[in-house]
Image (tube, rainbow, N blue to C red):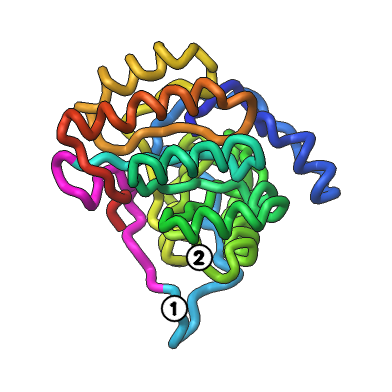
Amino acid sequence: MARHGGGRGWYGKVVGAALGVMMLATGASVWTAQAGAADEPAPQADAPAKPGSDVKPVSATIAHASDAGKRGVNITIDDGPDPKWTPQMLDLLRQYDVKATFCMVGTQAQAHPDLVKKVVAAGHRLCDHSVSHNTAMDKESGTYQSQQILDAERMITKASGGVRPMYYRAPGGAFTPDSRKLAASRGMRPLGWNVDSKDFEQPGADAMVATVQRELPNGPTVLFHDAGGDRAQTVEALRRLLPWMKQQGYTFGFPVR
């Protein structure tokens, strides 16, 4: 998701209760673009790929393009899964025969493994969106970043029944060069976005539709959310946008790997 406010965002209290871990609060973080630099030491992969494993390293550059070509669109949905909103979005995607990439928060995946399995069964792809959705994690230590990425990978993989996330999207775009390298070493392509629907701000479905229609020529990867608040506006916006995109000659794909 885009960087809204500062610190850990809406997951802070939930994660504190769920994990029983006291995390240091961080101040508001200025948007630094999705490839943000950092002075932290390199996170160390404490679960590196082993010879003969199915983990194949991928590019550490941030993906924005679509594997569906020049008229391709990547629908990406962040912060879930959520028992109320994820099923509604899955129904819409099924109705319009669209596949999407779900960027899941580790604690949410752990809490709702049935939904993770439904996402996979419907042919969508999984993305690691960290354990606790700290939008200032690029300011944290390398050890912290490593834990957030690798623990979420394990949580999502377990919840899915063994299907690994194919991408890593840093909360709020809080990437660092080293966190990108770590994710890529685990076979997860760092994932950016071109179009922010602004649904996290709940501006109304009309405003979301207008934003996406205006900005889609800027690039194919569109950002929505299925958790973190009331997502009724997002559902309505998708209900309008998916058929509109097809009418405009767009096809749906996945982010490049």
Q: Residue 9 in magenta?
A: no
Q: Residue 110 sits in which quadrant?
A: bottom right
Give the residue type at disc 1: Asp
Q: Residue 155 sits in which quadrant?
A: bottom right
Name the residue: 64% across, 52% down. 109
Name the residue: 41% across, 33% down. 223
Vertical order, 217 against 143 (above or below): above
Label 2 Cα neighbours within 10 Å, binned few <14 / some 14-19 / many ≥20: many
In the image, which residues are magenta?
A: 56-71
Do we see residue 144 in this rendering?
no
Name the residue: 62% across, 24% down. 230
Q: Percent x, y for residue 38?
A: 48, 42
Give the residue type at disc 2: Arg
Do we see residue 97 in this rendering?
yes
* Residue carrying label 1: 54
Is 36 or 124 nearer to us in this picture?
A: 124
Is 235 or 25 nearer to us in this picture?
A: 235
Label 1 Cα neighbours within 10 Å, binned few <14 / some 14-19 / many ≥20: few
What kind of element bears circle 2?
A: loop
Q: Percent x, y for residue 168?
A: 46, 51
* Residue carrying label 2: 164
Name the residue: 23% across, 34% down. 246
Comes first in the chain, label 1 or label 2: 1
The reply to whether the C-beta atoms of the residues labelled 1 and 2 are less than 8 Å apart is yes
What kind of element bears circle 1?
A: loop
Q: Percent x, y for residue 183?
A: 47, 58
* Real-space Cα separation, disc 1 to disc 2, in angstroms: 10 Å
Q: What is the chief secondary structure element of the magenta stretch? A: loop
